[in-house]
Image: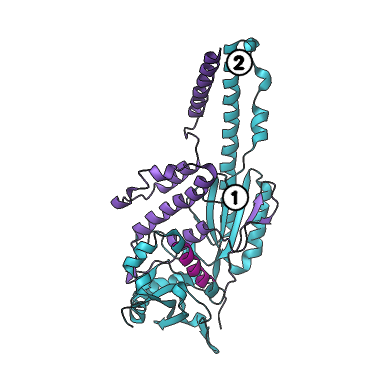
Chain colours: A purple, B cyan
């Protein structure tokens, strides 16, 4: 007897909200790689194998992957390659422990707005742009 | 077993779970990592679901190199998950982390014996349950931001250059404030959703958000959580998720699953 075997099978995601109603995302081939990697690399039972890659390496790799996958999107669609010149990303020779930084990096990677809470940075940016605009107008006269 | 072959481990279960009056559950129809046939190793009352792999491809040095290759990792991660998932439909199990390789059957048995008590405890806790993934994203609300922008509040001197610049900055400041408000509302909404869903689950785990580019949705991810549930509670849980989505229009909610219980296999800090 197979016991109380659960039915599993993580296929396409179901999305709710934001006016989308309930719709399956992607195709059924496209269980999000991030969702799989998060589970098979970050989670899952750890029992020492004879051959097991150091967890720190895996952790580093996972983080790097998050950024590399992000970069494929970003580079293609936005045409920027900030990640190629990021010294943090090229620090693998040093094998720096990066635990605890990943969220911060992830947010920074995803969020191009300045992260001060009160919007001062955003206003500064606006002002910089306005100054530039004024200079343009003045020089045009 | 010769030194050319290693044992790749997918999952561990209790021997009683996958063998019965009709004999063992046959897994040889499953093809695993490196195209090896999936088989089982029984010892100490436990069963490891494994397949043989070539050490040239899956030995320590090769793994170290291959894990850095995204295409390789994509394929191997999906194959590993495929076997874990297929076996999880047949019997309760514990998924094993990717790239756990033993030099042979004897070494696999030794590992099972060493961790027997811990493995049995964990199996009793999560075996037979499934994991659902829930992600919540903040939905931008441009209408609201516009509404809050007080276009009519321009000062009397608006016609002068200085005045209009000032008015512009005021308007922008208010728009930004409205944006922050809606972000705060979304963060609070995500907290509420998590609390509600966690209340229905046996256990819950919150992960760091995936980066905005990585998730297919280009919205800030506010919640990335996994919930452990009895397999029979799937209907109730998905209904609860749909209800939360209706109650929280400030969020887009994404549900994945059911997954084998990857996120609940033990101490978070194991091996760190």
Q: Magenta part mainly helix, strand or loop?
A: helix
The residue beneath circle 2 is: B164
Q: Position of residue A52 (x, y in %)?
A: 34, 67
Question: Residue B271 vs residue B253: left or right?
Answer: left
At numbered mark 2, what does the secondary structure look like: helix, strand or loop? helix
Question: Residue B214 vs residue A25: left or right?
Answer: left
The residue that appears at 59% across and 55% down in the rendered structure is B197
The residue that appears at 53% across and 52% down in the rendered structure is B224
Would residue A138 be visible to someone looking at this image? yes
Q: Which mark is residue B193?
A: 1
At numbered mark 1, what does the secondary structure look like: helix, strand or loop? helix
Labels 1 and 2: the sequence-earlier one: 2
Query: Do the numbered discs 1 and 2 sit on residues whose CB atoms are within 8 Å?
Result: no
Q: Kindly indicate whether the residues beneath marks 1 and 2 are on one polypeptide chain.
A: yes
Question: In the picture, residue B52 is in which quadrant?
Answer: bottom left
Q: Where is residue B99 in the image (x, y as percent from the top left)?
A: 40, 67
Question: In the picture, residue B159 is in which quadrant?
Answer: top right
Please state which of residues B190 and B212 is positioned toward the viewer in this rendering. B212
Mark 2 packing: few (<14 Cα in 10 Å), some, or many (20+)? Answer: some
The residue that appears at 47% across and 60% down in the rendered structure is A37
Q: Is residue A121 magenta?
A: no
Question: Residue B143 vs residue A126: left or right?
Answer: right
Give the chain letter at badge 2. Answer: B
Q: Position of residue B264 (x, y in %)?
A: 48, 63
Q: What stretch of residues is rendered in magenta?
A: B73-85
Between the C-alphas of marks 1 and 2, the distance is 43 Å
Q: Does the magenta stretch include residue B83?
A: yes
Give the chain letter at badge 1. Answer: B
Q: In which quarter of the image is the N terminus of chain B?
A: bottom left
In the image, residue B71 above or below residue B35 = above
Toward the left, the furthest residue is A94
Which of label 1 and label 2 is nearer to you? 2
């Amino acid at each position: 007897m197979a016991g109380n075997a659960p039915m599993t099978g993580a296929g396409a995601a179901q999305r709710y909200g934001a006016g989308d109603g309930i719709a399956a995302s992607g195709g059924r081939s496209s269980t999000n790689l991030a969702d799989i990697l998060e589970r098979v690399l970050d989670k899952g039972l750890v029992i020492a194998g004879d051959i097991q890659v150091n967890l720190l390496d895996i952790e580093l790799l996972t983080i790097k992957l998050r950024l590399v996958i992000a970069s494929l999107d970003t580079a293609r669609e936005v045409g920027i390659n900030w990640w190629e010149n990021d010294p943090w990303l090229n620090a693998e020779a040093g094998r720096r422990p990066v635990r605890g930084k990943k969220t911060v990096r992830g947010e920074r990677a995803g969020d191009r707005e300045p992260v001060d809470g009160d919007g001062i940075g955003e206003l500064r940016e606006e002002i910089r742009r306005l100054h530039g605009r004024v200079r343009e107008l003045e020089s045009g006269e | 077993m010769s030194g050319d072959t290693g044992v790749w481990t997918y999952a561990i279960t209790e021997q009683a779970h996958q063998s019965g009056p009709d004999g063992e559950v046959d897994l040889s129809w499953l093809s695993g990592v490196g195209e090896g046939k999936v088989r089982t190793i029984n010892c100490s009352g436990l069963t490891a679901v494994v397949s043989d792999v070539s050490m040239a491809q899956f030995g320590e040095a090769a793994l170290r190199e291959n894990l850095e290759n995204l295409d390789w990792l994509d394929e191997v991660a999906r194959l590993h998950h495929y076997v874990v998932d297929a076996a999880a439909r047949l019997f309760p199990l514990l998924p094993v982390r990717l790239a756990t390789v033993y030099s042979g059957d004897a070494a696999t048995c030794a590992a099972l014996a060493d961790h027997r008590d811990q493995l049995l405890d964990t199996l009793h806790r999560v075996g037979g349950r499934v994991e659902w993934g829930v992600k919540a994203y903040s939905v931008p609300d441009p209408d609201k931001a516009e509404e809050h922008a007080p276009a009519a509040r321009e000062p009397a001197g608006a016609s002068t250059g200085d005045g209009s610049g000032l008015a512009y900055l005021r308007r922008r400041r208010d728009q930004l404030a409205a944006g922050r408000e809606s972000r705060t509302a979304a963060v609070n909404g995500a907290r509420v959703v998590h609390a509600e869903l966690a209340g229905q689950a046996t256990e819950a785990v919150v992960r760091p958000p995936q980066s905005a580019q990585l998730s297919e949705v280009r919205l800030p991810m506010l919640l990335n959580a996994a919930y452990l549930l009895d397999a029979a509670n799937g209907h109730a849980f998905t209904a609860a998720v749909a209800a939360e989505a209706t109650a929280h229009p400030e969020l887009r909610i994404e549900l994945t699953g059911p997954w084998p219980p990857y996120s609940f296999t033990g101490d978070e800090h194991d091996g760190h």
